Image (cartoon, rainbow, N blue to C red):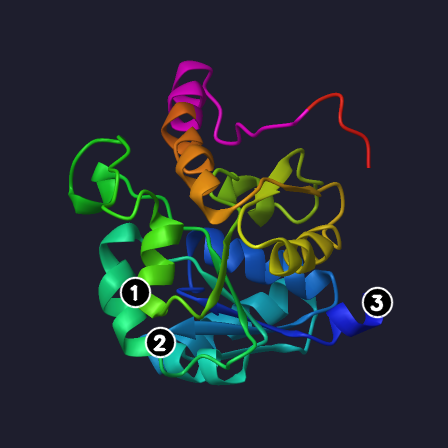
Amino acid sequence: MISERINMIIGIVGGTAGLGFSLALRLSIAGYEVLIGSRDNEKAKATAGEAMRITGSKKINGMLNEEVCENSDIIFFTIPFNGLYTTAKILRDKIKEDAIIVSTIVPLEADLGGRWRFIEPAAGSAAEALKEALGMDKKVVSAFTYVPANALLDIEKPVDCDIIVCGEKKPAYTIIEIIEHIPNLRGLYGGGLENSRITERLTPLLIFLNKEYSSKMAGIRITYIEK
């Protein structure tokens, strides 16, 4: 099972910075082939080169978001909320039929030039909005919605965080297996996609805690659950 998962190709839409780039590093170190996507092909290739330099992996490539979707088994959407609908419209016909889509998107006023406050989409959550925009037949789960990108970026240190994955059970557990190839991360199944309405709302709270306690890496552990 582990070898089957490792042979999956992981694509990251919007993978040239922030959480997307951090995930690319960690998943590459875990042994996955990673495709870094961007609207700018040259930027994607340059970022892939930087990721290869940092990780030592040769299994990282940069390309347009459309090509990422055509060639990936798992696709992380790590774009800001304000780009969700436009990006989904462009990419929805490029995604492979059996691909699993992972929404890391959190709808914040800050994406629109406002404060770090949650905006509730009409669908209830960004993950549900992404599923509606891509097509209800798509396998969409949510994960990494409240994980500090800075913690993932520091590849010399383990990430002290649990990752709650919401969505249909089978694709969610596939993503949990992938998550747990990253040292010290634990994936937990958080129920249906509608529970993304809860996990996405954790982000503004963690941003506040970071400011209050002069941190950049506040995370969450779920206690008294053994796996």
Q: Amino acid at mark 1?
A: Ala
Q: Is residue 62 magenta?
A: no
Q: Are marks 2 and 1 in contact (CB under 8 Å)?
A: yes
User: Can you give x and y, in whole percent of width and height, for residue 5 in the image?
Assistant: 74, 69
Label 1 crowd (10 A; few <14 / some 14-19 / many >=20): some
| Residue at figure coordinates x 61%, y 41% from the top left | 163
Q: CA distance from mark 2 to mark 3?
A: 29 Å
| Residue at figure coordinates x 44%, y 33% from the top left | 198
Query: Circle 3 is placed at which residue position?
Result: 1
Query: Circle 2 is placed at which residue position?
Result: 92
Segment tinted magenta in the rendering: 206-222
Q: Are marks 3 and 1 in contact (CB under 8 Å)?
A: no
- Quarter of the figure that contains the C terminus: top right
Q: At numbered mark 1, what does the secondary structure look like: helix, strand or loop?
A: helix
User: Can you give x and y, in whole percent of width and height, for residue 136 in the image?
Assistant: 39, 66
Quick one: label 3 or label 1, which is nearer the N terminus? 3
| Residue at figure coordinates x 54%, y 46% from the top left | 166
